[in-house]
Image (cartoon, rainbow, N blue to C red):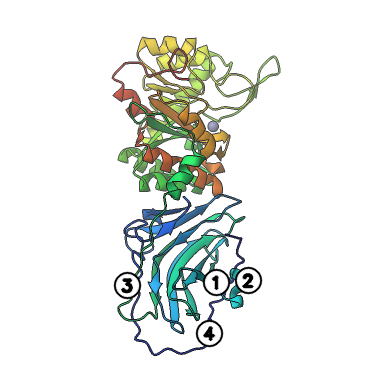
Amino acid sequence: MPRLIRLFRSVVLFCATVSAAIAASVLPNAGFEEGLTGWVTRDTMSQVLAEAAHTGKAGLRITDADVKKGSDLTSAKLPVVAGQALTLTFSARAQGDFLGVYFWFHDAAGKAVKNDVFKHSGGLPSVGVKKGAGEWTPYALKATVPEGAVTVAVWIHSWGSATGTADFDDFEVTGLSAGAQPIIGVQPDVAVQAVAAAMPELSQRKAPPVIIIKLDDLRQIDGKVPGAWIKIAEFLKSRKIKGSFGVITQTLEEATPAYVQWIKDRHVAGEIEFWFHGWDHGVWTNEAGKKMSEFGGRTVEEQSARFARSQKLAVEKLGFAFATFGPPGGGSGSHQDEATAQVMARDPAMKVWLYPSPIDASGRKLAAAGKVAILDRVWAVNFESRVGSPDFGKFVEGYAKNPDREYFVLQGHPTHWAGARFDEFVKIIDFLTEQKAVFMTPSDYAASLGGKPAQQVAGGKQG
Ligand SMILES: [Zn+2]
């Protein structure tokens, strides 16, 4: 399909009048309550989701991240008579001006009936969906059935080079003959093929993976929970997914009741595990002039003091001590060392260490002592390919290469996930949900191991 140019006005084809009886919309599954039943797509950009609903339980979400192709979703065909005045109404909300809704007319031989009046939009009457304020907006498309046409279908299409996300619901076509019966198209297999083509071969897993979502750098800003954190927490809740947020504890000193309560509510509900991600996340310079991260190269006493100060504040303000630690990054050295291992062994509340790397000798020794479970990382399998940039393609590539790994700690920085980056994260979650992944908090997963060590990268059988 050539790229179509937007035409924002509602349009009328011919000025003929019709005397046929007028009936209400018979468009099947016009509100997507039955998934994509009754609709035909040749891509994977059109999905039915609960969070895309305007009314009812489900709505259509178009997610177009492809700069070469547009989305393509077509309704059942409805019988029409030349000269009938049709009106299509629907609701939409869009995060960009990147798509439109069209009428396709066909003749008795199934050939498209186009009209030069609409040559700016490929010969089809159309209405462009506008970003607006990102709120649900009612739209209408009016057109008169052209000579020779015997059917009409509704087509939802995002433009080739454009990208964005938009939700649709509540389609209705009026102006049809009484008793008009829809002709439902056959869904081609290409949607499935498109996914297969984009994805590496996935070998059979013995069991679905456990996924530990590790999101870093929560801190209070201007007395508030930053919006990106509220967004991600709500998203995880809407998917009934557990996760974990790493807290930089320094701002707990000045924590507002609102910030404290937000953490407490999610902790008590068991939705999110909040863990210790450093006192200030600061980079410091050692005697050799090398930039080091907060827990790299400091004495046991210094590291211990940062843990103790943070745990005290957590208990005072939040009502619980952190049971999990994940060291902050930064600088050019290691983000943890033998001194950190000693502090972890001593801190009475600490049970889990989210290792920033594959496990090493020091970690193995501590894990063997039994007090602290070490959950290490498979570098190739992560939300972000670069810090702050989720990448679905890279994720699946790494995932496909690790069919024997029992769990993955997936790291991310949601304050960097604006717009399309967040969508990329959602794609990874969608994929993992299809894989029947079990989402757990670090503490829940460590507890589920019942004292046996977690599967590790080094010495493990993973590739
Ligand atoms: Zn961090």
Q: Residue at x 37, y 57 (%)?
A: 36
Distance, label 1 to label 2, CA atoms, is: 8 Å
Instruction: Report ligand 1 position as a quadrant.
Output: top right
Q: Provide residue 53's location: percent of width, then percent of height.
A: 38, 60
SS type, badge 1:
loop
Distance, label 1 to label 3, CA atoms, is: 23 Å
**Callout 1–callout 4 Cβ contact below 8 Å:** no
Of callouts 1 and 4, which one flags the residue occurring earlier in the amino acid sequence?
4
Mark 3, residue position: 181
Amino acid, disc 1: Leu
Q: Nearer the viewer, residue 230 or 436?
A: 436
Distance, label 1 to label 4, CA atoms, is: 13 Å
Mark 4, residue position: 14
Question: The N terminus lies in which quarter of the figure?
Answer: bottom right
Q: Provide residue 332's location: percent of width, then percent of height.
A: 64, 22
Horizontal relation, residue 319 to residue 156: left or right = left
- Residue 28, above or below 379: below
**Callout 2–callout 4 Cβ contact below 8 Å:** no
Mark 2, residue position: 120
Amino acid, disc 2: His
Of callouts 2 and 4, which one flags the residue occurring earlier in the amino acid sequence?
4
Pointer 4 residue Cβ closer than 8 Å to ligand 1: no
Q: Nearer the viewer, residue 107 or 42?
A: 107
